[in-house]
Image (cartoon, rainbow, N blue to C red):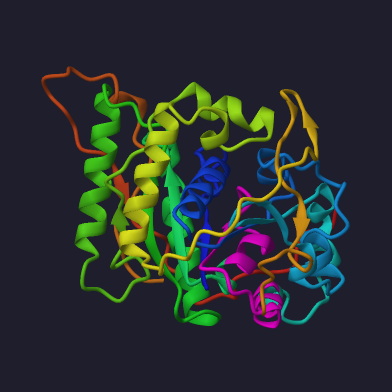
Amino acid sequence: MRTIAVINQKGGVGKTTTVANLGAAIAIRHRKVCLLDLDPQAHLTLHLGIEPGTTDVSTYDVLISDAHLRAAAMRVAERLWLIPSEIDLAAAEIELVSTVGREQLLRDRLVASRFDHDFLFVDCPPSLGLLTLNALAAADDVIIPLQPHFLALHGLGKLLETVSLVRRRINPQLRVSGVILCMYETTTRLASEVVADLKGFFSAARGGDTPWSRTRIFETVIRRNIKLAECPSHGLTIFDYEPGSNGAADYGALADEFLTCFDAPEREAGPALAARPFAQGAGGLAPFSQQSAAEADEVPTHTEDATVPQAASAQSVETDPSAPRPLAVTGPEETSDPPPAGPPREP
């Protein structure tokens, strides 16, 4: 199983939308996929039609009370599982302050669970706190969804610095494998400038010893599409809500490109699951089959120097179109190899 952490500490850049719809698209292509919601906001859980706090076991129980991941996994579609979250997860950093090895709890649970899925996608919170460190410690790869705006680039240096520290101290196999451009507007000059700057940065890192030395910017971009914003309120992925939309086409193409990079053998298509309503959202009942992984038919057996793009001033946007300017760049701060996480502040 390949574990992929989907991370960006800036909110609203398409992390949850990408995890839900890319995961669903890969499952449609006959791979077994598990989605783990590690965000206390539980938006991925809501996106898939599950009301947070209504499940017996969640990621909070897995991290705090040693609950088994297989008991938390719920089958929401054919070849697609979800490990749900709830608001209680927000208290995990405080409750785990005295726990030895608290940055590696998720990795330990995954090793003990012995999932036989092809891919596990972890939807991380919009921060670089303990929950995100757990995802990085457990992951093989990092994928960064990025909106092609200057502010979305602002924290990229700190994110890469954190990935580098985790690789040195906890997870030596960790690497940044890809960047997905979300909410892309093909008609804007700003988007093309940001993409050109990103390509220059990652190209310059080729052949180095950084976690991002082999990062690719996916050729498939996710265009801004209102249907992608609507489908979470119905508890559906874009393929169930509006399969003919641009959003479905983009995530389908992204899944194809993803599988050429993260090759996993195609599995035989199993019998279709009997759908039944589970949770009622703003759009009505979500027609997903809801089943624990333990009861399902298919039960799991189981920092370096770099020049990092930063936000440019507003003046770089308000320029004469005939005289484009390059984006401003800086480098990550030098560190003396501090531990990747300290104890959280007291509330």
User: 82 or 189: nearer the eye?
Assistant: 82
Q: Quadrant of residue 215?
A: bottom left
Which residue shows up at 26% across the image and 57% down it? 202
User: 152 or 16: nearer the eye?
Assistant: 16
x, y percent for residue 100: 77, 82
| Number of marks present in the image shown | 0
x, y percent for residue 173: 44, 79
x, y percent for residue 311: 38, 39
Does the segment drawn in magenta span residue 65?
no
User: 253 or 66: nearer the eye?
Assistant: 253
Query: Looking at the picture, does residue 228 appear above or below residue 40?
Result: above
Query: Looking at the picture, does residue 94 appear above or below residue 123?
Result: below
Which residue shows up at 38% across the image and 30% down it? 223
Which residue shows up at 44% across the image and 57% down it? 143
Q: Is residue 308 visible?
A: no
Point out the stretch of residues depicted in magenta. 106-135
x, y percent for residue 172: 46, 81
User: 225 or 283: nearer the eye?
Assistant: 283
Does the segment drawn in magenta span residue 113?
yes
Q: Is residue 117 left or right of residue 326?
A: right
Q: Quadrant of residue 270?
A: bottom right
Q: Is residue 140 left or right of residue 89?
A: left
Q: Is residue 144 visible?
A: yes
Query: Looking at the picture, does residue 285 appear above or below residue 17?
Result: above
Which residue shows up at 77% across the image and 41% down it? 276
- Residue at the extreme left of the image, as rendered: 322
